[in-house]
């Protein structure tokens, strides 16, 4: 039976979290740089995708995801002390990219890529937080669907290329992969014996 879940969806939105003084804007996808994805690949959060899969082009939306539906609770066990040797290039520590508050690409033994937040650089260890930046937060989205149609074979192949290491993360081949996509990527699961990705 033909897979009917592969839709090309593009949206503009404002993403809010609950702050001490009410909702705070933490991310925005504009008409010039919309968030776009192909459904059925796990590129967007499952609950986010379910809210939009049947929303037609031109329709506005507003919905909330609990932290359980989004990036889960903040897990202290995902804060790791890694050996400095993990972050060496040609025998030298990568001072250019590894510093406090840096966001760095990492890779586990299975080849899965994800991002870590450098909390502290010590003499022997580097403390890395592998929690998603929005872990522990309820998410509130308000936006508009600007595209919702069946994905073409070329777009699906492009998404497969992205998932296997290429860079085609959306519905349009001229979309720049930089900027805004990563909040919806899934984090690594399981053990994170990480390697530093030098890209």
Image: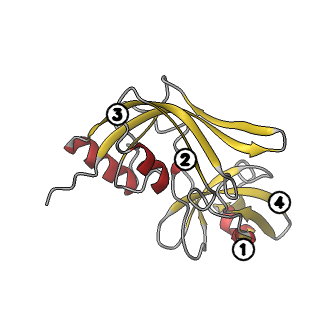
In the structure shown, which secondary structural element does the residue marked by tag 4 occupy? strand
Q: Earlier in the sequence, mark 2 or mark 4?
A: 4
Cα separation between marks 2 and 1: 22 Å
Of 146 and 54, nearer the camera is 54
In the structure shown, which secondary structural element does the residue marked by tag 3 occupy? loop
Cα separation between marks 1 and 4: 16 Å
Which residue corresponds to mark 2?
A: 182
Between label 1 and label 4, give the one nearer the viewer.
1
Between label 2 and label 4, give the one nearer the viewer.
2
**In the image, residue 22 lies at what x, y percent?**
78, 39
Q: Earlier in the sequence, mark 1 or mark 4?
A: 1
In the structure shown, which secondary structural element does the residue marked by tag 2 occupy? helix
Whether residues under marks 3 and 2 lie with C-beta atoms below 8 angstroms apart, the answer is no
Q: Which mark is residue 56?
A: 3
Q: Earlier in the sequence, mark 3 or mark 4?
A: 3
Whether residues under marks 2 and 1 lie with C-beta atoms below 8 angstroms apart, the answer is no
In the structure shown, which secondary structural element does the residue marked by tag 1 occupy? helix
Query: In this image, 64 relative to 118: left or right?
Result: left
Which residue corresponds to mark 1?
A: 77
Please say if 116 is above or below 85. above
Q: Residue shown at 72%/47% (left/top)?
A: 96
Quadrant of the snapshot with the N terminus: bottom left
Q: Earlier in the sequence, mark 2 or mark 1?
A: 1
Q: Earlier in the sequence, mark 3 or mark 1?
A: 3
Of 172 and 60, nearer the camera is 60
How dense is the environment of label 4, judged by Cα within 10 Å: few (below 14), some, or many (20 and up)?
some
Which residue corresponds to mark 4?
A: 120
How dense is the environment of label 3, judged by Cα within 10 Å: few (below 14), some, or many (20 and up)?
some
Q: Residue shown at 66%/63% (left/top)?
A: 130
Q: Residue shown at 15%/56% (left/top)?
A: 2
How dense is the environment of label 1, judged by Cα within 10 Å: few (below 14), some, or many (20 and up)?
few
Total numbered labels placed on residues in the image? 4
């Amino acid at each position: 039976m033909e897979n009917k879940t592969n839709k090309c969806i593009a949206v503009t939105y404002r993403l809010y979290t609950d702050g001490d003084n009410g909702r705070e804007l933490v991310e925005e996808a504009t008409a010039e740089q919309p968030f776009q994805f192909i459904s059925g690949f796990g590129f967007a959060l499952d609950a986010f995708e379910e809210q939009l899969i049947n929303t037609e082009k031109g329709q506005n939306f507003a919905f909330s995801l609990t932290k359980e539906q989004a990036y889960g609770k903040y897990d202290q066990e995902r804060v790791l002390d890694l050996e400095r040797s993990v972050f060496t290039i040609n025998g030298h520590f990568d001072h250019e990219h590894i510093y406090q508050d840096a966001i760095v690409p990492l890779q586990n033994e299975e080849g899965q890529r994800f991002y870590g937040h450098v909390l502290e650089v010590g003499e022997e260890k580097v403390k890395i937080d592998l929690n998603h930046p929005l872990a522990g937060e309820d998410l509130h989205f308000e936006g508009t669907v600007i595209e919702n149609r069946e994905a073409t074979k070329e777009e699906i192949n492009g998404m497969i290329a992205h998932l296997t290491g290429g860079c085609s993360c959306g519905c349009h081949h001229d979309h720049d992969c930089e900027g805004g996509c990563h909040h919806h990527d899934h984090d690594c699961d399981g053990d994170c014996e990480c390697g530093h990705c030098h890209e």
